[in-house]
Amino acid sequence: MQIRFGAISCDSHAQLSRDAFTTRMSPRKWGDRIPQVKVIPWEGRLVERWVVDGKVVGPRGVSNCPAAMGDPLKKTFPQRWEEVPKIVYDPHERLRALDRDRIDGEVLFFNDPIDSATLPFQVNSDGGYELACVQAYNDALAEWRRVSERYLPIAIVPYLSDITVICKEVERAVGKGHRGVAMAAEPSMARPGLKHFNDHYWDPLWSTCQSLGVPIHWHAHANIKLLPEYLVDDLVLRRTAAFSAQPQFVPNLVLSGIAERFPRLNWVCAESGMTWLKQVLELCDHVWERYHLWTEGLITRPTEVFQRQVYAHFWYEKVEEPVGHVLGIDNILWISDYPHGTSTFPHSWTVIENTTGHMSPECRERLLYQNALRLYRIQAAVDCGMPAPAGLERVA
């Protein structure tokens, strides 16, 4: 990868094409269950939606991409596939969006029909169907990497398969170019019968990811259920619940002993902000001290565990020294969240200046791209010689 602008988005969302699953799954075996875009009646009109195993996915539109729709309020969702801009789903055209926003590369998470709270083919299906969908998704997203090294895809996992199959799929996806794994922070909340995050059942997966050198990602609410069922379609409450879920689970990671057992495995708190971590980690340290948890096998102070193994994202928060001191300046990653409604696109550098303009160039480089290069093991040529946006200093 070439660093020309001085920023890597560590959380963006790749919209796969409408035929991503239909061209990669057997119609003879799976038929109409294959994830696909269909015309359906919706609130008195005909629209297009993703349909997965007979279930309509995405009440807002056919793609979650309001930042790319030309609406300054970022409230417009395309109702038909022809309305989805190519700079959202075509990896060749999307490079134009990166250049427009002056972003060198992006870590690619899921978009419709997949969401970190409702993975429809994973939650409601059988293991064989789920595995076929997961492999089709991972294969389709891996092809973005072939288009450009500026794309860093993140794989998903087949929860309903045996743990050996899960590990093999991670190995297969990484072999195709994926740079990490996204999964539920608490699998047992995603579907009854799945093992709790703390269960040793998952140890082979942690071991596999540690050996491969790829991090585990918890995206936004990460399947942690905070809303009652009748409120899950309230978009405002759902979004605020998403941003407040991970603070309740990070203590479980740093105090459960899992990080101690796998000291070279990294976790990423994706799209959930970072300033909340100061309070959470200080509380974990307090509990660790008062209960003398080092006598129970938790040798390392929670804050040190976090600084050794865990990363957090920021995009709207100003990076202050106390936060950087607790988290560690090397544990913070910048994101644009393109093409979602909370995205900084197409004014990312204005936001970057507002949040990091007070920092030294050396610290800012670490936040904006150096930490990402290290975490995702990316070799890069740094030449931030492009003209800076009007009114902003060049980051280099």
Image (spheres, rainbow, N blue to C red):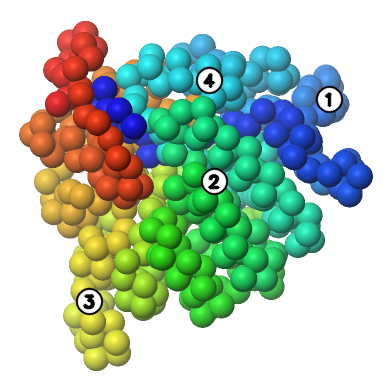
Tag 4: amino acid? His
Q: Position of residue 72 (x, y in %)?
A: 46, 14
Q: Residues within 10 Å of mark 2 (few under 14, many from 20)?
A: some
- Of label 2 and label 3, which has the lower sequence position? 2
Quadrant of the image containing the C terminus: top left
As measured in the structure, the alpha-carbon distance from the residue carrying label 1 to the one carrying label 4 is 27 Å
Label 3 SS: loop
- Of label 1 and label 4, which has the lower sequence position? 1
Q: Position of residue 290 (x, y in %)?
A: 20, 83
Q: Residues within 10 Å of mark 3 (few under 14, many from 20)?
A: some
Q: Nearer the viewer, mark 2 or mark 1?
A: 2
Taking the view exactly as shown, the residue that stands out farthest to the left is 360
Tag 3: amino acid? Thr
Residue highlighted by disc 3: 300
Label 1 SS: strand
Label 2 SS: loop
Residue highlighted by disc 2: 176
In the rendered image, the vertical position of residue 239 relative to residue 173, given as above or below: above
Q: Which mark is residue 39?
A: 1
- Of label 2 and label 1, which has the lower sequence position? 1
The answer to whether residue 264 shows anywhere in this view is yes
Q: Which mark is residue 92?
A: 4
Residue sitting at x 41%, y 56%: 215
- Of label 3 and label 4, which has the lower sequence position? 4
- Of label 1 and label 3, which has the lower sequence position? 1
